[in-house]
Image (spheres, rainbow, N blue to C red):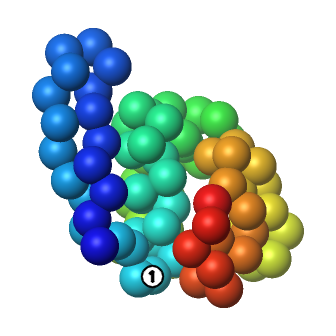
């Protein structure tokens, strides 16, 4: 089931597919906050390339990093891990 997102600036609506990986869930949560990868990287003290690798699944996070990313994005660690779909 896709969730309809609406741009606060222009009102353009688009649907995002439900993420099924941790990287996909990070990307999805980031986009819901209207952040780009550079914004998230700055908030986490990482490079944009590192965020890209995390979102694509080429780089994994340890448990401490998952908690930090979850707090930054305003979601639960369980959501990022795919334990539940409630953010």
Q: Residue at x 63, y 46 (%)?
A: 73
Tell whether 35 sits left or right of 87.
Answer: left
Question: What residue do we see at 64% from left, 80% from top?
Answer: 84
Q: Which residue is mark 1?
A: 21
Residue 6 spot, x, y in % from top left: 27, 33
Image location (x, y in percent) of residue 16 = 25, 58
Residue displayed at 42% across by 57% down:
27
Which residue: 68% across, 46% down?
Answer: 74
| Rendering quarter of residue 53 | bottom left
Q: Give the vertical position of 77 relative to 43 (above or below).
A: below
- On the question of residue 77 being in view, the answer is yes
Mark 1: secondary structure = loop
Relative placement, left or right, of 41 versus 66 is left
Local crowd size for mark 1, using a 10 Å CA cut-off: few (<14), some (14–19), many (≥20): some
**Residue 37 at least partly seen:** no
- Front-most of residues 27 and 13: 13
Vertical comparison of 55 with 71: above or below: below
| Quarter of the image with the N terminus in it | bottom left
């Amino acid at each position: 089931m896709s969730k309809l997102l609406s741009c606060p600036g222009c009102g353009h609506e688009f649907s995002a597919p439900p993420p099924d990986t941790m990287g996909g869930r990070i990307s999805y949560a980031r986009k819901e906050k209207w952040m780009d990868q550079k914004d998230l990287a700055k908030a986490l003290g990482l490079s944009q390339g590192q965020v890209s690798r995390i979102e694509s699944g080429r780089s994994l996070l340890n448990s401490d990093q998952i908690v930090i990313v979850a707090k930054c994005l305003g979601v639960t660690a369980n959501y990022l891990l795919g334990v539940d779909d409630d953010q």
